[in-house]
Image: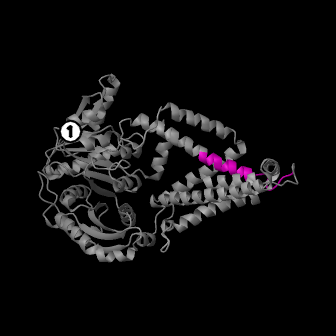
Amino acid sequence: MPPPILLARSSYALSGPRLHKDLRQTVYYLGPIGFYVIIVGALFSMLSAANATILAGSRVKMALVRRDHLPRQFDDIHPEYGTPYKTILLTGGFILTFIMVFTVLFGENPEAAEGSFLFGLHLGLESVTNFANFLLISGLSVVNVALIQSRRQSPELDRGFRVPGVPYVPAIAVIANFVLLVNLGLQNILIGLTAEAIGVVFWFVWKSRETPVEDIERETPTAVTERNPSGHDRDYQLVVPIANPDHTEQLMRTAHDIAADNDGEILVLSTVSLPEQTPLSRGQQYTDERREVLNRAMTIADGSGMAVESQDTEPEERVPVSGTIRISHHVDEAILNTIDQYDSDAVLMGWGGWLSRRRNVVLGSIVDTVITEATSDVFVERIEGESIGDAESILLPTAGGPHAELAGEVARAVARTTGARIEALRIVSPDATDEERTEAQETVDEAVGALEEVEGTGTVVESEDIADGILERSADNDITIIGATRDELLQRFVLGSIPERIGERAESSVILTKRNLGITSRLKRLLSRE
């Protein structure tokens, strides 16, 4: 919380005995003119730093809003000045609240040195400075710890910056920050920990809430909706956002297989994306182009004869297909709001590979956000290689866990319509013990057993590197379907590691899967991590 630091330090420096000592020294060395020069310079410095910090803080809160960590109302831009005025007011409100609590509600009582003032808690300007310092220093410590952990887990990841001497320099920084924290005093540390605990609780409560439909429609209004009445009685819904018309047929084939396997329906989504400065009301004039994309996708899934057809059964009933067009300033926001509004069970997205991505994203900023924030299962399909509709073999790497189980369900769904055989694969180290090899074999056997009526085999292969072992095996298969890495939940999935390397280098088509674990499950796994 930098603003309280600046305000408190400046105010405290100009008050009390310290003020008198500093003023006497200024008059002694610089004379009366120097005295006023120092005072005016200090005031201008304080105002300039506070102004810059408030503006920076408002931008941070705006980023939090766009990640759905704060109410969407704070995302508004002033129509005349183009500034995030609501987050600026929110930042100023926090600063005012801290000053009032620390200096008025729990301010020091100079006339009662041994008395009690409001439960005996004495704070004041120096305390608000230490409180702000605690939040700042603890945040810097967490960043350094995260840096060490990230470099240890994903050393091959291409990053946009370099830190010399990892892990030694970050470790020294953590130790130095810890020493600074200790010097703040026990009272200030407890107050800081309490504030951070309140923030954590607020985040989990906020993320577990149900967003009202009115808010969703205000943020991403629906321009067009075409609902298939036969889909209303289905218990499973798969949302398919269509951005690139060239990917439509491939995505709809995969969506049809997944929806049919779950006896569900497909909801095709197309988004009119507008610049931040353009009012959402103007989006209606751009819906015709998106309607063409929407109609094409619905026609492919509903009118091209893509019914469920296995080798031993007759074609079954078609999967119901509906469509909707939303207007939004952010495509990822439109996708997430559609999932929330319709309580969808899964979302299928496409991407064209990693080679052209920016350094600060993995699958693309939109896909990354949906993977992290969606309250549903997520499927990401690389649109490359042979058509999945013509697949004869599917590679299913597995290490157990919910994400791998979901990958097995997708593999079964595709195999039902294509007649493809599935190979469940587990990679072990050449130095693996007999116990580890037995566990690996049990894992692939369990994966094969879950395929039910689909043909499948289980294989355990030795390799020094897990990703390289999977890539070598994927060259002999038409599709590779892999779940998000179980360790560290989504962190390794989004930041790269095994799924990223496979998606980037595999010669076959790739589908990545991520099971929705919910806020409660994610917190439980976080707390139980070793």
Q: Is residue 272 visible?
A: yes
Please give left or right for residue 69 compared with residue 45 in the image: left
Please give left or right for residue 60 compared with residue 339 in the image: right
Please give left or right for residue 345 compared with residue 254 in the image: right
Q: Is residue 106 visible?
A: no
Vertical arrangement, residue 435 with respect to residue 325, above or below:
above
Residue 135 among those drawn in magenta:
yes
Query: Residue beneath label 1, please?
Result: 474
Judge the density around disc 1: few (<14), some (14-19), many (≥20) Cα neighbours within 10 Å: many
Identify the residue shown where x is 64% and y is 47%. Answer: 133
Which residues are the magenta region? 115-136
Residue 288: x and y in percent read 25, 75
Which quarter of the picture shows residue 501? top left
Vertical arrangement, residue 458 with respect to residue 451, above or below:
above
Please give left or right for residue 47 compared with residue 291 in the image: right
Residue 428: x and y in percent read 30, 29
Vertical arrangement, residue 210 with respect to residue 378, above or below:
below
Disc 1 residue type (three-letter): Ser
Which quarter of the picture shows residue 486? top left
